[in-house]
Amino acid sequence: LEKSKVISVKIKRDLQKVEKAIIDVCTSGERLLSETSLATLEAGGKRLRPALVLISGQIGEYDLNRLIPAAAAMELIHMASLVHDDILDGAATRRGTPTINNVWGNPVAVTTGDFLFANAFVLLAKINNAEVDNTACDAALSLSMGELYQMQTVHNSNQNLDDYLNKIYHKTAALFSASCEIGAVLAKGSQQEVEALAKYGKNLGMAFQIYDDVLDLEGSEKVLGKPIGIDLKDGTVTMPILFALEETKRDTRLCAVIENISPEQAEIEEAIELVHNTSAIDRTKKEAQKYIEVAIEEVKSISSKKARDDLTTIGEFVIKRYH
Ligand code: GRG
């Protein structure tokens, strides 16, 4: 995002300050943890969550002294969850770069995730705002629930749309929602504005994850930084897969891949093709679009034009991105 045209020059400049705050807090500890957390940071990432904190912070008083640690904390919680997720999945690469567990091994990766997570709360404590703390804590709890729901539903081809929506709310939308809500609280928005921003973030996050699940089936490895079809390989049932199961009346090959603990590459490719031969991808993109429309509707009540425009642009970006 720092290099894209999606966000304003001002937010890009402030995102650099957020980056510095993350670097400062991560390099304040042991050398090994500085090295692994910097490696996580330097591997890339869109910095969407901190951008959402800053953009939402424009709805009222734009108080950088508190927005910067809050935005840094949201990215640190996100980074910690990715480092832990890569351990759980045994992932070798993320963002096109070897994962911490791949380079340093699981014990160091677990500790790196803990360190990043703890540093998020070091920064939040400096803000000294109970509403911000509550929102961040709830989002962190949601992340662990999201991971648990994912774990409990893998390799199960008998899930419904509600199971999926509940899972993605916890693993993705809750942190998006919290990022927007925290920005709005720090800007001293009205109760109604804070609620609108939280709803915007939730709907944006739902659309983001739904679209992410489409990219797993139609993106390219070069752009995504990881192979495609990972969800099918891992037995993670996503919206396009659910639609394809419905349209093909539970095609036996598709069910077999989902239920197989280690499917062959050829079986995964066949399953991807099967999904592409249905209208599942198009239907899923339409669902993502609906969430974006709800999100954009929410921000119409925000009085700051700058904030409204930036939030709308981010909404449009989420369903047009390539990674
Ligand atoms: C709270 C430390 C902690 C752990 C909780 C492991 C875990 C338990 C939660 C992980 C849940 C999870 C895998 C969420 C995925 C969310 C998601 C959409 C990731 C991709 O986000 P992007 O595309 O990533 O914004 P970049 O690389 O751009 O930062």
Image (cartoon, helix red, strand yellow):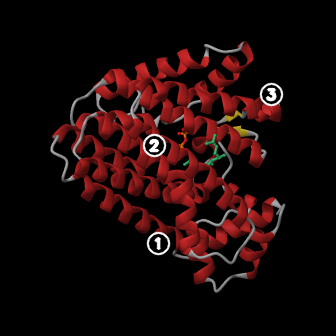
Q: Which residue is mark 1?
A: 283
Kindly identify the residue that appears in the image at 47 percent across and 34 percent down: 47
Up the image or down, 219 lies above or below 28; here it is: below
Q: Are marks 2 and 1 in contact (CB under 8 Å)?
A: no
Task: Identify the secondary structure beneath mark 1.
Answer: helix
Up the image or down, 256 lies above or below 90; here it is: below
Q: Can you tell which of label 2 and label 1 is closer to the viewer? A: 2
Out of 278 and 61, give the one closest to the viewer. 61
Disc 2 crowd rating (10 Å Cα; few below 14, some 14-19, many 20+) is few
Which is more N-terminal, label 1 or label 2? 2
Q: Are marks 3 and 1 in contact (CB under 8 Å)?
A: no
Which quadrant of the figure has residue 146?
Answer: bottom right
Q: Can you tell which of label 3 and label 1 is closer to the viewer? A: 3
Kindly identify the residue that appears in the image at 32 percent across and 56 percent down: 295
Out of 315 and 69, give the one closest to the viewer. 69
> Which numbered dot is residue 134?
2
Task: Identify the secondary structure beneath mark 3.
Answer: helix
Task: Indicate the amino acid at tag 2.
Answer: Asn
Disc 1 crowd rating (10 Å Cα; few below 14, some 14-19, many 20+) is some
Disc 3 crowd rating (10 Å Cα; few below 14, some 14-19, many 20+) is few
Whole-percent x, y for residue 150 in the image: 67, 59
> Which numbered dot is residue 104?
3
Q: CA distance from mark 3 to mark 1?
A: 41 Å
Q: CA distance from mark 2 to mark 3?
A: 33 Å
Out of 117 and 318, give the one closest to the viewer. 117
Kindly identify the residue that appears in the image at 44 percent across and 58 percent down: 207
Up the image or down, 215 lies above or below 15; here it is: below
